[in-house]
Image (spheres, helix red, strand yellow):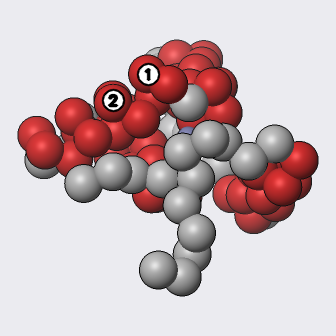
Amino acid sequence: MVLNCRHVWEYISGYLDNTLDEETRLDVERHLEHCEICSAILDSTRNILVLTADDRVFELPVGYSERLHARLQRVMLESPPPDSEPESS
Ligand SMILES: [Zn+2]
């Protein structure tokens, strides 16, 4: 299965938590190899986790995911990745 960016965003937290099944994880990795947008998102998400990987309870700020997704939408609109698929097919 070929993932588009939206799929990868759904899977990113599972990818970092290692909770994806093998097949999905490989699909995500394959996408990350050639998609700068998703690689950047993965890096920044991982950095957040590293920064907070101590004994403190970490909670995402209210609205964090909404803001992240809004920003992603803008990035996507400005520069659609070459592998993006039409929504209707
Ligand atoms: Zn992508």
Q: Residue furthest bottom?
A: 88
Point 41% across, 35% down: residue: 31
Q: Quadrant of the N terminus?
A: bottom left
Instruction: Work out whether residue 62 or residue 16 is closer to the camera in this orientation and state it.
Output: 16
How many numbered marks does the figure carry?
A: 2
Q: What residue type is disc 1 on?
A: Glu
Q: Position of residue 28 (x, y in %)?
A: 34, 39
Q: Is residue 21 above or below residue 57?
A: below
Residue 89 in sight in this render:
yes
Q: What residue type is disc 2 on?
A: Glu
Image quarter where ligand 1 lies: top right
Q: Position of residue 60 (x, y in %)?
A: 65, 49
Alpha carbons under labels 2 and 1: distance apart: 6 Å
Q: Position of residue 78 (x, y in %)?
A: 89, 47
Point 54% across, 45% down: residue: 83
Q: Is residue 2 above or below residue 35?
A: below
Asked whether, in this view, residue 83 is left or right of residue 14, the answer is right
Q: Which residue is mark 1?
A: 33
Q: Is residue 2 above or below residue 82?
A: below
Asked whether, in this view, residue 22 is left or right of residue 35, the answer is left
Badge number at residue 83: none
Q: Which residue is mark 2?
A: 29
Instruction: Work out whether residue 13 or residue 30 is closer to the camera in this orientation and state it.
Output: 30
Q: Position of residue 64 (x, y in %)?
A: 74, 54
- Is there a contact, CB below 8 Å, between mark 2 and mark 1? yes
> Crowding near pointer 2: few (<14 within 10 Å), some, many (20+)?
some
